[in-house]
Amino acid sequence: MSHIINNNWNAKSAWLATAALAAMLSMFYVAPVRAAAPGITGTSFNFSAEANRISQPDGASVYSWGYGCRTAPAGFAPAAIAGATCPSMQIPGPTLIVHQGDQVTVTLTNNLPAAAGNTSILFPGFQVCAAVMNPDGSCPAAPTGVPGLLTREAAHGGSVTYSFIASTAGTHNYYSGTQGDLQIEMGLYGAIIVLPTAVPAGCRAVASTLPDGQTDYRNAAAAYNHAASCYDREYLFQFSEMDPRIHSQAEDQAGAACTQPGGCMAVDTEPYHPAYFMINGRSMPDDMDPNYAVQYPHQPYNGNPHMHPGELVLLRIIGAGRWQHPFHEHGNHVRILGRDGNLILSQTDATKLAGPLLFTTTTTPGLAMDGIFYWTGKGLNWDVYGHSAGGLYTDAAFPAYLGKPVVCIPDANGYYTADPLAPNYYEWCQDHNKPLEAHPFGAVGSGGPVTLPDANILTNGSWYGGSPYLGPDATTRAVGPTGSTPPSGTIANSPTGEAGFAFMWHSHNEREITTNNIFPGGMMMMMLVDPQAYLINEAN
């Protein structure tokens, strides 16, 4: 599998990022949990639009509107996801996971307060019928719902049905087509993942278990029907912001009697002053709690990516609010595959991708994009696994690796890919056996092992292995089998612990990494690079 990004990550930036995070993670550490791209499956969906409340890390309970399941969905994906639910209202709305070519039908019932007036759903990029589509793909002469400005709408207590052919693969969004300045702000938006029809050449088919014993949580083998869009993991991020003043006005007027289609609310949506900045309906650190966590009954989706070195990670990114958000994925650039289901290819060679390489995946309101991210350690100029010449990987907690010779035979791209079960799979072989040279971050002389870093510099927490190396036995490999124990007060990982590298993924608009102007919060999460020996469990 070829890699399409040149990694420009460097050691200094990694250490600086780690130092900046030390205090924060010691305060906000949560149990290791995963993200995946969860949603509901099928071709026919029955939605309700209704009011309820969502929570924020500052303790606020915010009156909101959202789409949810009126009847139970056909199923949930990924198949191994745990605790999946589809409440009657959620933010964002249920992620629809369908297949390219499916005829998709969504029936929406308007259970919003009467004062909110009519409501609807737009499905950008698809030819939509306001009724169940005829067998020949044409729209019936008699549409459902009532006329609206942009689409047919559901009156208060009434319903409208939409149907369309999921014609293009990739990530798409949906949102209210009625009073968008109010209804989208209140939470009426969601995502559609359209899976390609086949497994492109060179892509690994979805299986229940991978060759290395790990569970496969992907929804498909590739993002598009193209060999250059293969991936190993996937995560969906929907970015939105929220002005609680607007929500308070809507709540104050929600009980008013009303028979007008446009509603009877007089809510000022300008000037706009958001206080909350959310990823998948949650702010940091709530977005690092599990999917479907019981403490967020109307915010089921999290945002907490994990990966192994060398894995191609598909990022599905949607701008769901009214502002742009310059989101930065520390560790590498992101190669954009396509936008709104449109794969970006070279004009002269359709086998080649032509999407931009982005330092920040700046979201645009209403726009969805797919991109590939990966991390390998290339460019560090030291051995991230802490090998030594002639040594063995000594982790007794993983018998499959015990006593396995540490080798790094480069493939055509310079990585070790001959043995997917090796603990240093996708190691950048040019750095194999290179010690961490002496510099201000705590290493000692050339050719020998490093000393344990100053506990005040590196993060002290359950993601910290006690040394600058990947792996659950990284402390032993840093100081040798008879070396010193970690510094006093350090929380050292057990041999079965995670001990990965933590990178902050966050908005580059500083205000957006706060919650009601309090740091840390907002559009922020941690991306963890876990050693190959660690089994990543995305079941929650």
Image: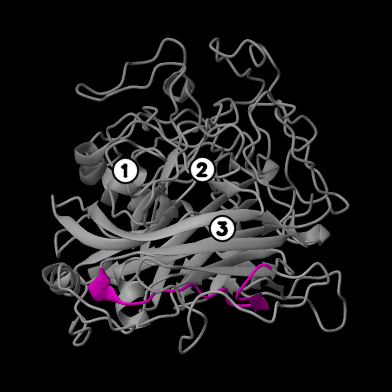
N-terminal of the pair, mark 3 or mark 1, is: 1
Magenta segment boundaries in residue numbering: 114-132
Q: Residue at x 71, y 48 (%)?
A: 220
Q: Amino acid at mark 1?
A: Pro
Q: Residue at x 13, y 49 (%)?
A: 59
Depth-wise, is mark 3 or mark 2 nearer the camera? 2
N-terminal of the pair, mark 2 or mark 1, is: 2
Q: Quadrant of residue 136?
A: bottom right
Q: Nearer the viewer, residue 354 or 121?
A: 121
Q: Secondary structure at mark 1?
A: loop
Q: Residue at x 81, y 44 (%)?
A: 411
Q: Amino acid at mark 3?
A: Leu
Classify 391 as above or below 165: above
Depth-wise, is mark 3 or mark 1 nearer the camera? 1
Q: Are marks 2 and 1 in contact (CB under 8 Å)?
A: no
How far apart marks 3 and 2 lie (CA) works out to 28 Å
Q: Position of residue 379 (x, y in %)?
A: 58, 53
Q: Secondary structure at mark 2?
A: loop
Read off the residue under disc 3: 315
| Label placed on residue 512 | none
Q: Quadrant of residue 255?
A: bottom left
Binning the other alpha carbons within 10 Å of mark 3 as few (below 14), some (14 to 19) or many (20 upward) gives many
